[in-house]
Image (cartoon, rainbow, N blue to C red):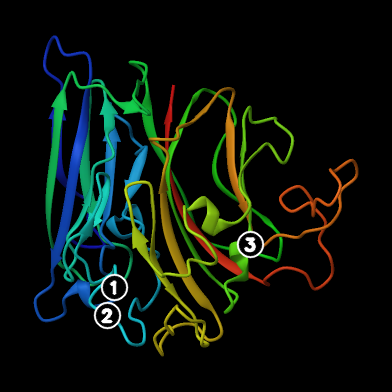
C-alpha cells in the first residue's frame, strides 16, 4: 500500500434473501523489507476504510494501532522494557489483541451492513510504502448483540475519532457525542500525553443522555483508574482484560511502578493509553449522548451537597493553578446507533 493510492482490499454484496450481514473479525500485519514498519511510529498505521451500504464517506475509518488500544506515541519503547510489555505482545481478549512484537493486530467488533461493504487501505501522508496482509471475516443473517441484547435491524456502527487535541487544566474531554438518536456506546481507546505525575488521571467519567442532559449526568467513575477497573494510578502497571486494559504507561521522571519513557519521548510529559468495552455493562442512550472525562479534576464543597462531601466530579470550579496542566489527547469511540 502507498500514501497516494487508496486500494480496495475486500468487498461483499449481500446475498438475495439475506436481511443483514456483519464483519466479525479483522486482522492486519505489515511487511516492510529492510525498513520494517513495526520498528517504530509507523507500526499499525495503515488506514482501513469500511464503506457501508454504498457510502461515499466511510462510517468506520481505523488504524489498527488505535483500534486495539494503543496511542500513537512516537516511540513505544520504555526504559527497562520487559517481556510482558503489551506493545511487544502477545496478548488478546474477546475483542482486540496484539499477538506479535511485529504488528499482528486483530479486532472482533462487529460491523453490520445491509446491502454491501467495501474495505480499502491507504497509508498516512509521508509514510514510506510497505506491504500489508489483512483478513476480513463475516457472516450473513448474523445479529449484533450488546449486553446480550440484540440490536435493531437498522443498527449501524460509527467510529468517532479525535486526534491530538490540546486540553487545558480541568477542561472537559469529549470522547463520544451524538446530538440525536438511540444506540449504545460500545468501546473506546484513550491516549494522553501530559503531566509527568499522571495527575490528569484524576478526571471523572460522565455519561449524559439525552444529549441535552445537564452536567454531571451519570457519574461513571471518580477517576480514570476507577473507570478502567484498576486503582491508585494503575499501581500494578499495564494489564489487559476483556472489559478494560492499559496498553502503555510511562513517565519522564521516576514514578514507580511505571517505567521511564524512552529518551526520544516528549520532554517532561508522561504517556498513557487504555481501552474500555461496555458489553457486560452496556451504555445505552436515547435522544443523543455525550461520554466525557476531564483533564484532572477538583474537589471542593458544592452548594446543597451532603455534609463532608468533597464535591469531586460535581464541582466545575477552575481554581488558579489547579489541575495537571496541558494534556494532548487522542481517542476512538465505537458507537452503535439506530
At horizontal 61% and vertical 66% (from top left) the residue drawn is 200
Quick one: 260 or 10, which is closer to the camera?
260
Query: Can you say which quadrant of the picture contains the N terminus?
Result: bottom left
Q: Residues within 10 Å of mark 2 (few under 14, many from 20)?
A: few
- Which quarter of the picture shows residue 54? top left
Measured Cα–Cα span from mark 3 to mark 2: 28 Å
Q: Identify the residue position indicated by label 1 in the image.
A: 85
Q: Residues within 10 Å of mark 3 (few under 14, many from 20)?
A: many
- Which quarter of the picture shows residue 87? bottom left
Asked if residue 75 lies left or right of residue 217, the reply is left
Q: Secondary structure at mark 2?
A: loop
The relative height of residue 16 versus residue 128 in the rendered view (above or below) is above
Q: Is residue 6 visible?
A: no
Asked if labels 1 and 2 touch by Cβ distance under 8 angstroms, the answer is: yes
Measured Cα–Cα span from mark 3 to mark 1: 24 Å
Q: How many marks?
A: 3
The relative height of residue 191 versus residue 77 in the rendered view (above or below) is above
Q: Identify the residue position indicated by label 2 in the image.
A: 82
At horizontal 71% and vertical 50% (from top left) the residue drawn is 313
Looking at marks 3 and 2 on the same chain, the residue that comes earlier in the sequence is marked by: 2
Looking at marks 3 and 1 on the same chain, the residue that comes earlier in the sequence is marked by: 1
State the mark number for residue 46: none
Q: Identify the residue position indicated by label 3 in the image.
A: 202
Q: Position of residue 151 (x, y in %)?
A: 36, 20
At horizontal 69% and vertical 58% (from top left) the residue drawn is 171
Amino acid at each position: 500500500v502507498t500514501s497516494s493510492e487508496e486500494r480496495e482490499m475486500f468487498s461483499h454484496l449481500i446475498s438475495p434473501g439475506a436481511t443483514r450481514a456483519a464483519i466479525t473479525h479483522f486482522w492486519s500485519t505489515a511487511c516492510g523489507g529492510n525498513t520494517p514498519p513495526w520498528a517504530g511510529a509507523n507500526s499499525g498505521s495503515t488506514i482501513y476504510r469500511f464503506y457501508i451500504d454504498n457510502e461515499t464517506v466511510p462510517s468506520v475509518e481505523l488504524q489498527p494501532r488505535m483500534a486495539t488500544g494503543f496511542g500513537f506515541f512516537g516511540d513505544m519503547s520504555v526504559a527497562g522494557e520487559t517481556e510482558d510489555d503489551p506493545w511487544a505482545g502477545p496478548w488478546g481478549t474477546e475483542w482486540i489483541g496484539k499477538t506479535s512484537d511485529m504488528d499482528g493486530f486483530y479486532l472482533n467488533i462487529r460491523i453490520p451492513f445491509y446491502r454491501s461493504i467495501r474495505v480499502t487501505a491507504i497509508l498516512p501522508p509521508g509514510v514510506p510504502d510497505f506491504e500489508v496482509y489483512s483478513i476480513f471475516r463475516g457472516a450473513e443473517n448474523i445479529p449484533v448483540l450488546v449486553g446480550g441484547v440484540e440490536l435493531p435491524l437498522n443498527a449501524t456502527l460509527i467510529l468517532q475519532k479525535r486526534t491530538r487535541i490540546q486540553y487545558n487544566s480541568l477542561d472537559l474531554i469529549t470522547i463520544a457525542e451524538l446530538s440525536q438518536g438511540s444506540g449504545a456506546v460500545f468501546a473506546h481507546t484513550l491516549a494522553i500525553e501530559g503531566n509527568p505525575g499522571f495527575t490528569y488521571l484524576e478526571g471523572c467519567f460522565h455519561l449524559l443522555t439525552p444529549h441535552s442532559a445537564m452536567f454531571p449526568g451519570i457519574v461513571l467513575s471518580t477517576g480514570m483508574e476507577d473507570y478502567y477497573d484498576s486503582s491508585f494510578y494503575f499501581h500494578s502497571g499495564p494489564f489487559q482484560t476483556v472489559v478494560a486494559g492499559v496498553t502503555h504507561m510511562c513517565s519522564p521522571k521516576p514514578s514507580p511502578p511505571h517505567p521511564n519513557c524512552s529518551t526520544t519521548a516528549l520532554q517532561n510529559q508522561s504517556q498513557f493509553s487504555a481501552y474500555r468495552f461496555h458489553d457486560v455493562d452496556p451504555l445505552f442512550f436515547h435522544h443523543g449522548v455525550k461520554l466525557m472525562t476531564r483533564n484532572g479534576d477538583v474537589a471542593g464543597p458544592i452548594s446543597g451537597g451532603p455534609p463532608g462531601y468533597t464535591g469531586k466530579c460535581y464541582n466545575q470550579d477552575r481554581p488558579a493553578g489547579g489541575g495537571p496542566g496541558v494534556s494532548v489527547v487522542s481517542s476512538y469511540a465505537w458507537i452503535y446507533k439506530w
